[in-house]
Image (spheres, grey):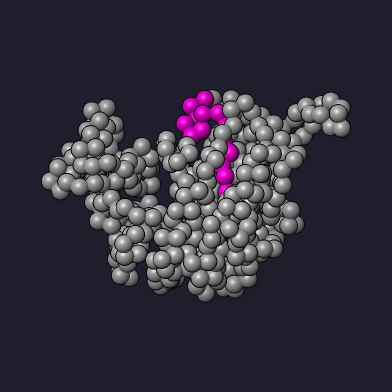
Amino acid sequence: MFVLSLDPDGLSLDWCLRCVAAGHTVKLYTKGAKASHIGLGLVDKVSSWKPYMKVADLIFIADNMEFMDDLVEYKKQGYPIFGPDKRAAKLELDRMYGQEVIEEFGGSTIPSHRFTNYDAAIKFVKEHGGRWVSKPIGEEEDKTLSYVAKDEADMIGFLSKRKSKGKAVSPFILQEFRPGIELCVTGIFGPSGWLGYWFEGFEHKKHMHSDVGVNTGEMGTVIRATKHSELAEKLLVPMEETLKKIQYTGMLDMNVIVDEKDGTPHPMEWTARPGWPMWNIMQPLIKGDPAQWMKDCLDGKDTLECEEKTCVGVVMANSDFPFNTKEDDDYLDFPINTDDADIDHVHPCEVKLCKTVKMINNQLVEDCLEWGTAGSYIVVCTGVSDSVSEAKDKAYKVVDNVKFGNDMHHRKDIGDKCEKWLPKLHKLGYSKNWKF
């Protein structure tokens, strides 16, 4: 099969290499100087993607920001595209629209209000009081607008500081704070509807242990493949008609807060694309060829087979991640030693091939070719088992056997919060096939 990965940030490298190992011809497109190093020497990279669209048997879309207008037209013409175009991306990027879609099928939404002016937002908080969460919206998101306030005074202080600093106003929403248990569920949709497996997950977005520090996007996730998800039944299954109308084929994730008193799932945001590192962490649970089931999905067939187990994934980063303030060259070519690790559970992210010196059989060998760093978001290490605690132990055993650079770092507590949350979710009727 000829596979084209349209991936501006280069995060699909792990999946591309799995496709190559399965015998497929793979072309990887990335965009910009930062991503230009990712995958060099490991996979065939291309500088232009459109010439390969007509010959590709499978086109994997890893992002929902770039080329979305173009992809609408390609999809309408029947190109084998697995992933979003502009219509699906709107669910995630326009948070107000995403909430409206949920309201249409009777889901419980969190009161949200759109702003393009700090003064108007400050006035709103003063008038309404309470606790609010600021979130960016739109195609050019300013992620520094993400802020969970402790109370109304805290939110007013946050907005006032941005105003006083002369921060440009990107569109944002104020969403009413909801306490509870954060949980997500991912499904895979094709022309014939939802595939048979769901992937429930617990995300760990903060940089440091115990959920402190800056938001990184993700430092690790715990997921489980299952054929039954109460959360999916309530929030993903009702989306079927909407997704068929926009001809969507790909992954759709919903992140929610589950009310600890009555079990109501309050949706926070859609993700209409592969999640990162979610996609890496799904790979050990998916049986067989990593690309064939996706091509079958496009053809209206469900051939996806998964292990109904738990997988813990831990992000290993380098240098000043997630700030990345150095010159691009400062992140390159630190050798990645995986000699003692279970390589099937080491998922390369910002990685390239590099030359290095190493000891082999107690002999110094020069010009060895092995993985090297191509950024600061280096690898995801995974472990699979029937329980969260066993999967965590396996994942961290892999982490302990991966070495690179002088300042690699990772969180040590991925999955720990499940010990407290799972019993509560079980009582509310969710995630019953999980065990800690």
> Which quadrant of the view contains residue 352?
top right
Decide: is 320 above or below 181.
above
Query: Residue 122: x and y, percent?
Result: 18, 40
| Residue beneath the point at 69% across and 53% down | 18
Q: Is residue 324 magenta?
A: yes
Magenta range? 313-326
Q: Please state the horizontal and vertical placement of residue 144, each as a whole percent of the image.
A: 36, 37
Taking the image as drawn, is residue 347 in sight?
no
The residue under the point 79% across, 29% down is: 358
The image quadrant that residue 288 belongs to is: bottom right
Q: Residue furthest left?
A: 127
Q: Position of residue 74 (x, y in %)?
A: 51, 60
Q: So how many labels did they put on this image?
A: 0
**Looking at the picture, how far across and down is residue 412, in whole percent?**
54, 40
Q: Is residue 152 above or below residue 311?
A: above
Q: Is residue 56 left or right of residue 367?
A: left
Q: Does residue 338 appear anywhere in the picture?
A: yes
Q: Residue at x 61, y 53 (%)?
A: 390
What main secondary structure does the magenta stretch of the protein show?
Answer: loop
Give the position of the N terminus as an image quadrant. Answer: bottom right
Observer-nearest of 356 and 361:
361
Q: Which residue corresponds to the image point at 32% horizontal and 41% vertical from the top-left?
A: 147
On screen, residue 415 versus residue 127, left or right, reads: right
Q: 49 or 236: nearer the eye?
A: 236
Rendered position, 288 above or below 94: below
Q: Is residue 59 magenta?
A: no
